[in-house]
């Protein structure tokens, strides 16, 4: 039992050391985008979506993530307009309406 607890403490210490020593590659970001749905006639929407750091590095990565999330609900990504920080996202909240952080 003592050995098990000691091993557990070592693993936790190593994990914390790694977490503190490893810089984050990129902070979370937001994108504003336009999407369409054609199942029952043409529908369009403008939205703002939050992405994790890995998808924030370039537009191609962001497009893949946004496309996949929208596709789950029958939407097709038309374009990503911009990659934003939190302030940029907040400024667009009114325009995005119901599609602000929906996906």
Image (spheres, rainbow, N blue to C red):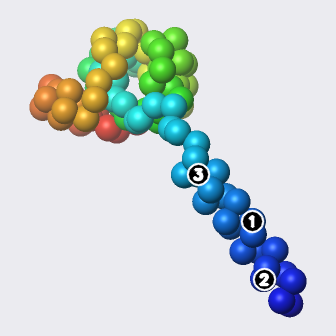
Q: Nearer the viewer, residue 95 or 15?
A: 15
Which residue is labeled 2 in the image? Answer: 5
**Kind of element beneath mark 2:** helix
Q: Which residue is drawn at 51% across and 38% down?
A: 24
Above or below residue 29? Residue 83 is above
Which residue is labeled 1 in the image? Answer: 11
Q: Within the image, what quadrant is residue 46 found in? A: top left
Q: Quadrant of the N terminus?
A: bottom right
In the picture, measured across the screen, residue 100 lies left or right of residue 56, that is left
Question: Could you tell which of marks 1 and 3 lies nearer the N-terminus?
Answer: 1
Q: Which residue is drawn at 38% across and 9% down?
A: 79
Which dot marks residue 67?
Answer: none
In the picture, measured across the screen, residue 35 lies left or right of residue 2, that is left
CA gap, disc 1 and disc 2: 10 Å
In the picture, measured across the screen, residue 45 lies left or right of residue 68, that is left
Question: Could you tell which of marks 1 and 2 lies nearer the N-terminus?
Answer: 2
């Amino acid at each position: 039992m003592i050995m098990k607890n000691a091993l557990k403490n070592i693993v936790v210490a190593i994990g914390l050391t790694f977490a503190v020593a490893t810089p984050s590659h990129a902070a979370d970001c937001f994108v504003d985008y336009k999407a369409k749905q054609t199942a029952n006639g043409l529908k369009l929407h403008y939205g703002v979506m939050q992405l994790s750091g890995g998808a924030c590095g370039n537009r191609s990565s962001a497009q893949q993530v946004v496309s996949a999330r929208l596709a789950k609900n029958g939407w097709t990504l038309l374009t990503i307009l911009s990659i934003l920080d939190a302030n940029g996202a907040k400024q667009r909240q009114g325009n995005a309406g119901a599609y602000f952080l929906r996906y």
